Image (spheres, helix red, strand yellow):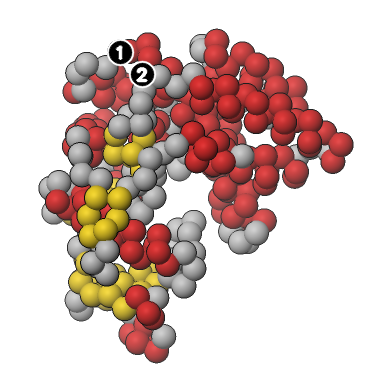
């Protein structure tokens, strides 16, 4: 792709995509040879749904699907993660704004839209099978590198049984727009507004999922008290939530998500040679044990993980 030489490559994420910034046009080239449908077509379709609902997301400028790229609006370089790390603003106030964006997202009713090839795209449901298969990444990538060969099969069978049990204990229906990667690195500060990027994985799922992604974000360490304040503010601005049922789902989804993340980060390190993700795994373990601490639904999982990974020391 000769024309890409004119643009500056941006540090990528955990996907197969490459990003190039065009300062002159204030645009970004998203290049994706693998998983083109998701990374180009679906990405733009979800962006359109967000924009239709008055949520800031990258607009499509041009596309060349045959040559594996789209050109989208550049929302800027400054992420909410960077703003929080700088500590120039009150982090709690910044996160209140983020929670208002989350509320707005969760009010989206649109599920269908035409993509740039003028074909209808419908956001799929976050089915139990998807949730289960995601969590199994922990079994596939992390477990073989931590347990002896003779223990792997038995442990994975027991863990998968617990995963199915936890999924069966979720209360809320799959009726809410779920971003699936709603964390501060995917939120961009743009002219006093907050924009959303990395939107291609959206599904219709459990209301508690994106809140768990945000509060228990492994990339940004926060205190237990800060997490509690965010959770309570979310409840304050979202009426008609049954606390016990919602809290149960929040804890289960946080645990399942962080098991998945440990699997994904291990895969990124060993398959893709992206070793920088390994340093985030200890905090993912902290989040898992934090959310299992006071909920009896995790009784068997706590015993299983503690027995097989005794070297993991979690300070809560």
From where the camera sits, is residue 56 visible?
A: no
Instruction: Please provide percent x and percent y for residue 263.
Output: 60, 44
Bin the neighbour count of mark 2 within 10 Å (Cα to Cα): few under 14, some 14-19, many 20 and up: some
Note whether 165 is above or below 123 in the view shown. Answer: above
Image quarter where the N terminus lies is bottom left
Identify residue for label 1. Answer: 242
Q: Residue at x 35, y 26 (%)?
A: 173
Instruction: Please provide percent x and percent y for residue 290.
Output: 52, 21
* Outermost residue, right side: 150
Q: Residue at x 26, y 24 (%)?
A: 234
Instruction: Please provide percent x and percent y for residue 141.
Output: 67, 46
Label 2 with label 1: CB-CB less than 8 Å:
yes
- Figure disc tally: 2
Identify residue for label 2. Answer: 246
> Splitting the image into 4 quarters, where does residue 190 fall?
bottom left
Q: Residue at x 21, y 51 (%)?
A: 49
Image quarter where the C terminus lies is top right
């Amino acid at each position: 792709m000769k024309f890409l030489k004119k643009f500056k490559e941006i540090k990528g994420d955990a996907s197969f995509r490459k990003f190039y910034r065009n300062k002159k046009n204030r645009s970004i080239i998203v290049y994706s040879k693998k998983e083109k449908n998701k990374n180009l077509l679906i990405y733009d379709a979800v962006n359109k749904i967000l924009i239709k609902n008055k949520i800031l997301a990258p607009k499509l400028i041009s596309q060349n699907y045959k040559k594996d790229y789209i050109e989208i609006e550049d929302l800027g370089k400054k992420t909410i993660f960077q703003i929080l790390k700088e500590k120039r603003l009150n982090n709690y106030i910044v996160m209140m704004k983020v929670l208002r964006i989350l509320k707005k997202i969760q009010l989206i009713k649109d599920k269908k839209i035409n993509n740039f090839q003028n074909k209808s795209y419908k956001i799929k449901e976050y089915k139990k099978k998807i949730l289960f298969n995601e969590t199994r990444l922990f079994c596939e990538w992390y477990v073989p590198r931590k347990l002896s060969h003779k223990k792997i099969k038995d442990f994975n069978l027991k863990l998968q049984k617990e995963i199915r049990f936890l999924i069966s204990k979720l209360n809320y229906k799959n009726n809410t727009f779920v971003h699936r990667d709603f964390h501060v690195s995917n939120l961009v500060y743009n002219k006093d507004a907050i924009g959303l990027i990395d939107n291609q994985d959206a599904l219709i799922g459990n209301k508690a999922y994106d809140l768990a992604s945000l509060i228990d974000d492994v990339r940004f360490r926060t205190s237990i008290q800060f997490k509690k304040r965010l959770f309570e503010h979310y409840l304050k601005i979202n009426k008609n939530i049954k606390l016990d049922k919602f809290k149960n789902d929040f804890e289960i989804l946080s645990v399942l998500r962080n098991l998945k993340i440990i699997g994904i980060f291990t895969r990124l390190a060993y398959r893709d040679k992206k070793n920088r993700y390994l340093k985030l795994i200890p905090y993912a373990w902290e989040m898992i044990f934090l959310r299992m601490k006071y909920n009896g639904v995790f009784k068997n999982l706590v015993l299983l993980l503690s027995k097989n990974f005794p070297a993991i020391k979690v300070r809560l």
